[in-house]
Image (spheres, helix red, strand yellow):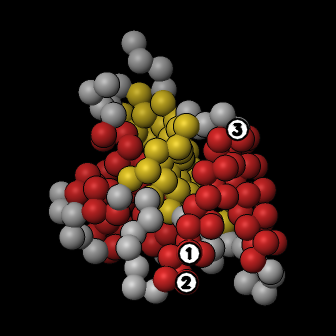
Amino acid sequence: MKEIERVIGVDPGLTTTGFGIIDEKAGQTRVVAYGTIKPPLKETLANRLEFLNSHMTNLLGKFEPHVMAIEDTFHSKNVKSALLLGQARGVLLLAAASNGIVAIDYAPRKVKQSVVGSGAADKKQVQYMVKQILKIDSMPKSLDVSDALAIGLCHINQNKYL
C-alpha cells in the first residue's frame, strides 16, 4: 500500500508567496496547512529574499513534505516583474534543494487544466474548485493560497498513476 505523500504547493511571489500543504493517500487528499509568506516591503531586495528563504526553510522543516510543486514562471510583458519573480522562485527552489526536497515546476495553464478542467480558468474559478475538491469550509481571502493549493493538487493529479 502506498504511503502518504505530502506535497507543498507554492505560488511564488516577492510580495506574497502562497503555500499549501496537502497529504494524499490512496486517492484521498487532506489539507494539512496553508498560508502566506509576506516579506517586508520596505526592506532591501536581498533582505526580502532572505526572509522568503528562512520562512520557507522553516515550513519545510516543520511539515517535512516529500515534494515541492511550484508554479513555473509565465511570460510577462513587464520584464522587471518577471525578473523579480524569478529571483523569488530561485530562493524557494534553493530552500527545497537545501532540504533535500525535489521541486517540480507546473505551468499556470497546466494547473488550471488539472484543477478546473480549463487552462483558461480565472483565479476565482480555481479558488472555487480548490474549496470543493479539498472540502474546505472557508477559504482564505488570499488567491495566493488557493493558487498554491491548486498547484499541490495539480502535482497529485499528475502523479496519480505512477
Q: Percent position (x, y) of residue 49?
A: 73, 67
Q: Percent position (x, y) of residue 55?
A: 74, 57
Pick the residue in front: 162 or 27: 162
**Residue that carries the numbered disc 2 in the rendered image:** 80
Classify mark 2: residues with Cα within 10 Å, few (<14), some (14-19) or many (20+): few
- Residue at 26% from the left image edge and 52% from the top image edge: 114
- Residue at 62% from the left image edge and 66% from the top image edge: 88
- The answer to which quarter of the image holds residue 132 is bottom left
Pick the residue in front: 118 or 139: 118
- Examine the rendering and report whether any part of residue 45 can be seen: yes
**Eye-nearest disc, 3 or 1:** 1
Direction from residue 37 to residue 128 in the image, left or right: left
**Residue that carries the numbered disc 3 in the rendered image:** 99
Type of residue at label 1?
A: Leu
Name the outermost residue toward the left. Answer: 118
Tell me how far mark 1 sits from mark 2, CA to CA.
5 Å
Quadrant holding the N terminus: top left
Q: For numbered disc 1, what is the local secondary structure?
A: helix
Q: For numbered disc 2, what is the local secondary structure?
A: helix
Label for residue 83? 1
Direction from residue 126 to residue 41 in the image, left or right: right
**Marks 3 and 1 close (CB-CB < 8 Å):** no
Q: For numbered disc 3, what is the local secondary structure?
A: loop
Type of residue at label 2?
A: Lys
**Marks 3 and 2 close (CB-CB < 8 Å):** no
- The answer to which quarter of the image holds residue 98 is top right
- Residue at 30% from the left image edge and 41% from the top image edge: 157
- Residue at 23% from the left image edge and 70% from the top image edge: 121
